[in-house]
């Protein structure tokens, strides 16, 4: 009759140390490949060391280190550029990363720029069909989108005028491509 592992004699049981050693030997080449692939250059080591020192010098532990990192990130996003007020999210007031068109959306109802993080947060709450800023329903087709933009242009909104000029330049929203009209609108927006 076959024996189970519990009923096996001590001589039949595998030596746990031998098995562990064999597994460690099999994993060693893979571990070495991973370590060599992730090995840092001396410059990267210096930068990482400075970050650790800066974070350890903060008084307050991990919370202040996280705040210091967030502050550093904001300073890096804003560094080297004179950022206009329109580069901030109208919901959370954080700077939007460059290129702003990739990291934010502008709704045609109010022409307010909203970052993708706020869009994600609102979608998780289930408000998929409303503008995040003014809470009006979103445009469902190009005609209503164009009508909303035109309404904002009639109120002399520079952002809406610029967007309408872009639409004329590229022929979007079912508009015919009209470069002279786009230049006229860009001049008006400036």
Image (cartoon, rainbow, N blue to C red):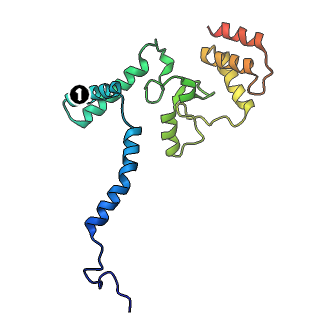
Residue named by callout 1: 53
Quarter-of-image position of residue 3:
bottom left
Instruction: Classify residue 14 as left or right of residue 188.
Output: left
Q: Nearer the viewer, residue 137 or 163?
A: 163
Q: Secondary structure at mark 1?
A: helix
Q: Nearer the viewer, residue 151 or 59?
A: 59
Q: Residue at x 63, y 36 (%)?
A: 138
Where residue 129 appears, as percent x and y from the top left, is: 60, 41
For residue 129, above or below residue 40: below
Mark yes or no: residue 104 visible: no
Where residue 97 appears, as percent x and y from the top left, is: 48, 25
Where residue 95 appears, as percent x and y from the top left, is: 45, 23
Q: Nearer the viewer, residue 27 or 45?
A: 27
Toward the bottom, the furthest residue is 1
Mark yes or no: residue 64 visible: yes
Q: Residue at x 38, y 26 (%)?
A: 73
Identify the image quadrant of the C terminus. top right
Instruction: Classify residue 139 as left or right of residue 103.
Output: right
Number of other residues with Cα within 10 Å of mark 1, as a class: few under 14, some 14 to 19, many 20 or more:
few
Quarter-of-image position of residue 10:
bottom left
Q: Residue at x 27, y 71 (%)?
A: 15
Quarter-of-image position of residue 46:
top left
Identify the image quadrant of the N terminus. bottom left
Instruction: Classify residue 96 as left or right of residue 187.
Output: left
Total marks shown come to: 1
Q: Nearer the viewer, residue 118 or 36?
A: 36
Toward the right, the furthest residue is 176
Where residue 109 appears, as percent x and y from the top left, is: 62, 28
């Amino acid at each position: 009759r076959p024996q189970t592992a519990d009923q096996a004699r001590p001589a039949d049981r595998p030596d746990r140390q031998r098995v562990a050693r064999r597994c460690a030997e099999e994993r060693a080449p893979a571990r070495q490949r991973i370590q060599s692939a992730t090995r840092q250059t001396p410059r990267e080591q210096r930068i990482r060391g400075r970050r650790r020192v800066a974070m350890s010098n903060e008084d307050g532990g991990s919370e202040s280190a996280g705040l210091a990192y967030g502050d550093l990130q904001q300073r890096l996003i804003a560094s080297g550029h004179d950022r206009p007020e329109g580069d901030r999210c109208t919901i959370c007031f954080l700077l939007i990363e460059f290129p702003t068109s990739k990291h934010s959306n502008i709704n045609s109802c109010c022409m307010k720029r909203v970052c993708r993080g706020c869009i994600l947060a609102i979608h998780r709450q289930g408000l998929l069909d409303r503008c995040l800023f003014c809470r009006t329903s979103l445009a469902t087709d190009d005609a209503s989108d164009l009508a909303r933009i035109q309404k904002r242009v009639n109120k002399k909104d520079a952002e809406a005028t610029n967007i309408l000029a872009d639409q004329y330049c590229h022929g979007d929203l079912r508009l015919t491509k009209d470069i002279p009209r786009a230049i006229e609108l860009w001049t008006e927006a400036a």
